[in-house]
Every structure is written in C-alpha cells, then in structure tokens.
Amino acid sequence: MSNFLATLGENFKTIFSSPLTLITLIGCAILLIAFIKFKSLKFNSKLIARIGLAIALAFILDMIKIYSLPNGGGSISLGSMIPIIIISFVYGPSIGLFTGFLFGLFKLILDPYILNPIQVLFDYPLPFMAVGVAGFFKNKYLGASIGMLLRFISHFISGVVFFGSYAPEGISPIIYSLSVNGLAVGGELMICLVLLAFLPVERLVKMLKSNIATI
C-alpha cells in the first residue's frame, strides 16, 4: 500500500511539475465532458439548419476584420461570436457549446496555424466552444462577457505555453500572451457588447424560442 501511494505521489508530482502535461489533461478532460454532453443532444432538421446558419454567419463576420494585430497576433472581427452567443441564448448552453466547437473545427480546417496538437486544442475547439457558456446566463451582457472570458483563458494558456518564444526580449511569455490575447479577445468582446446593445436580441430570441415550441 505504501509503495502504491508513493508511486501515485510521484505521478502527481510529475504531472503538476510539467505545464504541458497538466494542460493536456485539463483540455482532454474538458473535451471528454463536452462529448458526453453532446451525445445527449437531440437534433432535428430545423436545429441543424440553424446551427449551420450560425456557423456560416460567424465565418462571414470573422472575415470582416476591424483590426489585425502585428506579427500574426490575431485580429478583431465584426463580432464573429454573436451568432454563437445568440444560438446559445435560444437553445441553451449545450447547443451553444456544440456550435462553438464546430466553428472551431471548421476554422482549424480553413485557417490552420499548427505548432502542437495541444496548441490546436486550446486555440480552436476549446476557446470557441467556451463562448457557448453564454447560454447559462439570462443577462445577455454577462453571458457574452463570461463566454469571451473563457475563450480568452484558453488562448492565454496557449500563448504562454506554445507562443512564449515569440515574446520580445525582456518580456515574459505571461505578459506577452496577456497583452496579445487580451487585446484581441477584449476588442472582440467590446464589438460584441455594442452589437448586443443595438440588435433586437431579446425579440429575436423570443421569436426563435416560440418557433421551437411549434415544431
């Protein structure tokens, strides 16, 4: 028993002493939980069409760049996360997470930047899936802010672990990732909040929800 506990302790020590191993476990655990949740989702033709429309609109908005950061540090689009946020308000967070996950996969296929399989995980499926968390909140501004904060955290982790070597001399990877991803995701959030303020989101959500009830 003592040997088992000693071995277990050494394994935990190894895991927590290696950032890459730790974030790999975290990322895989999140994906596993999400896949278990996705298996319980029930789809119909109208829902599939709306998920497809949301992803298509997200890509169209993503192509409209408000500002591009230098050295490939990301960009600020015309509120590309709005369709994912709205579908999460209409159908709930599970569908929002699934829609964001699909958007991340398609973005990986169409516009890949690959350094490492775990970097791919934290830069594509996980951050955009996290935006769907907005559906847990009734307040549209709070929901969007929390979803985008979780997206930022995912990109931030990737920036520190995988893009730290790109940091200018004298700047730590943490500060570099914080500034680059903070500007990109923070700017995107500001655009989303402005659009949420001007768009008739409540009316749109109510109309789509009532339409669901008649299916």
Image (tube, grey):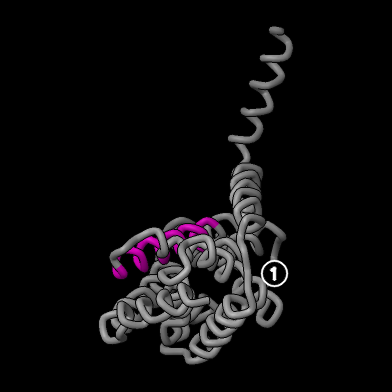
Outermost residue on the left side: it is 197
Residue 91 is a magenta residue: no
Q: Nearer the viewer, residue 192 or 206?
A: 206
Q: Name the residue rendered at 68%, 76% in the picture.
A: 112
Name the amino acid, label 1.
Ile
Q: Residue 148 sits in which quadrant?
A: bottom left
**Callout 1: few (<14), some (14-19), or many (20+) C-alpha neighbours within 10 Å?**
few
Residue 153 is a magenta residue: yes
Q: Name the residue rendered at 68%, 15% in the picture.
A: 6
**76 shown above or below 4:** below
Predominant secondary structure in magenta?
A: helix
Read off the residue under disc 1.
Answer: 114
Left or right of 144, for residue 103:
right
Q: Name the residue rendered at 31%, 63% in the picture.
A: 138
Q: Residue 47 sits in which quadrant?
A: bottom right
**213 shown above or below 135:** below
Q: Residue 11 sits in which quadrant?
A: top right
On the image, the x and y values in percent for residue 144 come to 36, 68
Q: Nearer the viewer, residue 163 or 15?
A: 15
Q: Name the residue rendered at 55%, 69% in the picture.
A: 100
- Which stretch did the figure color magenta? 140-157
On the image, the x and y values in percent for residue 39 come to 66, 56
Tell me the element at label 1: loop
Outermost residue on the top side: it is 2
On the image, the x and y values in percent for residue 4 come to 72, 14
On the image, the x and y values in percent for residue 40 come to 63, 55
The N terminus lies in quadrant: top right
